[in-house]
Image (cartoon, rainbow, N blue to C red):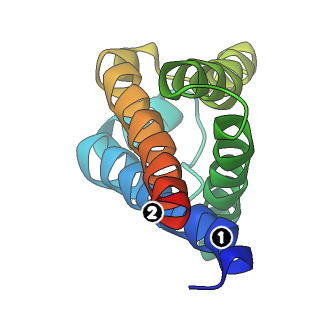
């Protein structure tokens, strides 16, 4: 594979993983919790296709950030910095807006850490394959 394609492949593969992980966590495991929480606020949980598209874009942007961080940091550092920037900041904002159901955190925290770690590992392994 041409070396210039390796970053694109890394970001794409990590982005696919992130989006699959997000879908599983939020649409399979936690969907009922999200629906009930928004209903308790007198709101409808935003599930229109455009919302899914924006989250898909977020996933690929997150993968891009992870890719570029992994070029400068080790695996653990990449995971921690990416996770704090991607998830902790998002949860702070959604909590501040009053739309974060805190009951999801015992499930969301470990799964989002795993999601971020695997995405960083994908980037690292694909780069190692290109170099080695």
Q: Is residue 44 above or below residue 4?
A: above
Nearer-the-camera pick, 17 or 70: 70
Between tags 1 and 2, which lies in front?
2
The percent coordinates of residue 21 (x first, y second) are 37, 51
Q: Are marks 1 and 2 in contact (CB under 8 Å)?
A: no
Nearer-the-camera pick, 22 or 73: 73
Q: Which residue is mark 2?
A: 129
Nearer-the-camera pick, 89 or 83: 83
The percent coordinates of residue 117 (x first, y second) are 42, 34
- Toward which corner of the image does residue 100 lie, by quadrant? top right
Q: Is residue 120 above or below residue 53?
A: above
- CA distance separating discs 1 and 2: 31 Å
Name the N-terminal-most of marks 1 and 2. 1
Q: Is residue 50 visible?
A: no
If the image is split into quadrants, where does the N terminus sit? Answer: bottom right
Label 1: few (<14), some (14–19) or many (≥20) C-alpha neighbours in 10 Å: few
Q: Is residue 124 above or below residue 98?
A: below
Q: Which residue is mark 1?
A: 53
Helix, strand or loop at label 2? It is: helix
């Amino acid at each position: 594979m041409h070396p210039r394609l390796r970053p694109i492949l890394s970001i794409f593969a990590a982005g696919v993983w992130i989006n699959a992980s997000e879908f599983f966590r939020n649409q399979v495991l936690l969907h009922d919790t999200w629906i009930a929480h928004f209903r308790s606020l007198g709101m409808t949980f935003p599930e229109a296709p455009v919302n899914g598209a924006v989250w898909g874009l977020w996933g690929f942007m997150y993968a891009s950030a992870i890719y570029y961080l992994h070029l400068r940091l080790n695996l653990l550092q990449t995971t921690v910095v990416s996770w704090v920037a991607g998830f902790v900041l998002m949860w702070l904002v959604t909590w501040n807006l009053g739309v974060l159901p805190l009951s999801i955190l015992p499930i969301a925290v470990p799964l989002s850490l795993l999601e971020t770690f695997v995405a960083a590992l994908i980037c690292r392994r694909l780069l190692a394959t290109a170099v080695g």
